[in-house]
Amino acid sequence: MNSSIKNALTMLRLSVNNHPGVMSHICGLFAGRAYNLEGILVTPEAGGATCRMWLVVKDDGRMDQIIKQVSKLHDVLDVRVGQAEPAVFSKLAGCLEH
Protein backbone atom coordinates (compact mmCIF):
# COMPACT_ATOMS: atom_id res chain seq x y z
CA MET A 1 0.00 0.00 0.00
CA ASN A 2 1.26 3.48 -0.87
CA SER A 3 2.46 5.26 2.31
CA SER A 4 0.53 8.47 1.48
CA ILE A 5 -2.67 6.45 1.17
CA LYS A 6 -1.78 4.31 4.18
CA ASN A 7 -1.42 7.38 6.42
CA ALA A 8 -4.33 9.37 5.01
CA LEU A 9 -6.39 11.18 7.61
CA THR A 10 -9.80 9.67 8.15
CA MET A 11 -12.65 11.13 10.16
CA LEU A 12 -14.94 8.98 12.26
CA ARG A 13 -18.25 10.59 13.17
CA LEU A 14 -19.84 8.93 16.18
CA SER A 15 -23.18 9.42 17.87
CA VAL A 16 -22.81 8.47 21.51
CA ASN A 17 -24.77 8.60 24.75
CA ASN A 18 -23.92 11.70 26.77
CA HIS A 19 -22.80 10.82 30.28
CA PRO A 20 -19.54 10.76 32.25
CA GLY A 21 -17.01 8.17 31.10
CA VAL A 22 -18.11 7.76 27.47
CA MET A 23 -15.23 9.76 26.00
CA SER A 24 -12.79 7.95 28.31
CA HIS A 25 -14.01 4.55 27.10
CA ILE A 26 -13.67 5.53 23.45
CA CYS A 27 -10.24 7.13 23.88
CA GLY A 28 -9.14 4.14 25.98
CA LEU A 29 -10.06 1.77 23.18
CA PHE A 30 -7.80 3.69 20.79
CA ALA A 31 -4.98 4.00 23.33
CA GLY A 32 -5.12 0.31 24.19
CA ARG A 33 -4.45 -0.49 20.55
CA ALA A 34 -1.65 2.10 20.17
CA TYR A 35 -3.81 4.13 17.79
CA ASN A 36 -3.23 7.89 18.04
CA LEU A 37 -6.12 10.32 17.78
CA GLU A 38 -5.05 13.32 15.67
CA GLY A 39 -8.14 15.36 16.58
CA ILE A 40 -11.24 15.15 18.76
CA LEU A 41 -14.32 17.36 18.66
CA VAL A 42 -17.44 16.69 20.73
CA THR A 43 -20.72 18.58 20.97
CA PRO A 44 -24.05 17.72 22.59
CA GLU A 45 -27.11 17.06 20.44
CA ALA A 46 -30.73 15.98 20.85
CA GLY A 47 -31.29 18.11 23.94
CA GLY A 48 -28.13 16.78 25.59
CA ALA A 49 -29.07 13.09 25.72
CA THR A 50 -26.49 12.26 23.07
CA CYS A 51 -23.30 13.77 21.67
CA ARG A 52 -21.77 13.94 18.23
CA MET A 53 -18.07 13.07 18.31
CA TRP A 54 -15.61 13.55 15.46
CA LEU A 55 -12.33 11.66 15.66
CA VAL A 56 -9.50 12.25 13.19
CA VAL A 57 -7.08 9.35 12.82
CA LYS A 58 -4.35 8.24 10.44
CA ASP A 59 -5.45 5.12 8.61
CA ASP A 60 -2.61 2.65 9.03
CA GLY A 61 -4.57 -0.29 7.66
CA ARG A 62 -6.39 -1.22 10.89
CA MET A 63 -9.34 1.11 10.39
CA ASP A 64 -11.91 -1.65 9.76
CA GLN A 65 -10.89 -3.39 12.98
CA ILE A 66 -11.08 -0.17 15.01
CA ILE A 67 -14.52 0.69 13.59
CA LYS A 68 -15.85 -2.75 14.51
CA GLN A 69 -14.50 -2.44 18.04
CA VAL A 70 -15.80 1.12 18.56
CA SER A 71 -19.22 0.05 17.24
CA LYS A 72 -19.41 -2.66 19.93
CA LEU A 73 -19.12 -0.16 22.79
CA HIS A 74 -22.43 0.09 24.65
CA ASP A 75 -22.66 3.89 24.47
CA VAL A 76 -21.79 4.19 20.77
CA LEU A 77 -25.04 4.51 18.82
CA ASP A 78 -23.67 5.08 15.30
CA VAL A 79 -20.32 5.23 13.49
CA ARG A 80 -19.77 6.90 10.10
CA VAL A 81 -16.51 7.10 8.19
CA GLY A 82 -15.42 9.89 5.86
CA GLN A 83 -12.45 11.84 4.62
CA ALA A 84 -11.04 14.08 7.31
CA GLU A 85 -11.56 17.80 6.97
CA PRO A 86 -8.52 19.13 8.83
CA ALA A 87 -9.54 22.70 7.98
CA VAL A 88 -12.36 22.42 10.53
CA PHE A 89 -9.88 21.48 13.24
CA SER A 90 -7.41 24.17 12.11
CA LYS A 91 -10.11 26.86 12.30
CA LEU A 92 -11.12 25.66 15.75
CA ALA A 93 -7.50 25.70 16.93
CA GLY A 94 -7.18 29.26 15.62
CA CYS A 95 -10.23 30.33 17.62
CA LEU A 96 -8.88 28.76 20.79
CA GLU A 97 -5.54 30.58 20.49
CA HIS A 98 -7.16 33.99 20.96
Image (cartoon, helix red, strand yellow):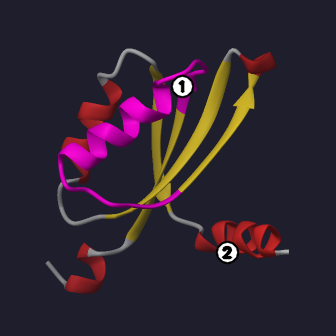
Instruction: Mark 2: give few (<14), some (14-19) or many (20+) Cα within 10 Å.
Output: few
| Amino acid type assigned to the residue bearing label 1 in the image | Val
Helix, strand or loop status at disc 1? strand
Answer with mark 2 or mark 1, whichever residue precedes in sequence. Answer: 1
Task: Identify the residue at horizontal 65%, vertical 67% (top origin).
Answer: 89
Task: Give the camera-side residue of 75 and 5.
Answer: 75
Helix, strand or loop status at disc 2? helix
Percent coordinates x, y for residue 16 in the rendering:
54, 25
38 in magenta: yes
32 horizontally vs 52: left or right: left
Percent coordinates x, y for residue 28 in the rendering:
31, 39
| Amino acid type assigned to the residue bearing label 2 in the image | Ser
Relative to 70, residue 38 above or below? below
Percent coordinates x, y for residue 86 in the rendering:
59, 72
Percent coordinates x, y for residue 59 in the rendering:
29, 64
- Magenta range: 15-39
The disc label shown at residue 85, or none: none
23 horizontally vs 8: left or right: right
Task: Identify the residue at horizontal 32%, vertical 60% (top origin).
Answer: 36
Relative to 13, residue 73 above or below? above
Name the residue furthest left: 1
Task: Identify the residue at horizontal 19%, vertical 43% (top origin).
Answer: 65
Quadrant in the picture for the N terminus: bottom left
Question: Which residue in the structure is indicated by mark 2?
Answer: 90
55 horizontally vs 58: left or right: right
Name the residue furthest right: 98
89 in magenta: no
Instruction: Mark 1: give few (<14), some (14-19) or many (20+) Cα within 10 Å.
Output: many
Distance from Cα at disc 2 to Cα at disc 1? 24 Å
Q: Are marks 2 and 1 in contact (CB under 8 Å)?
A: no
Question: Which residue in the structure is indicated by mark 1?
Answer: 16
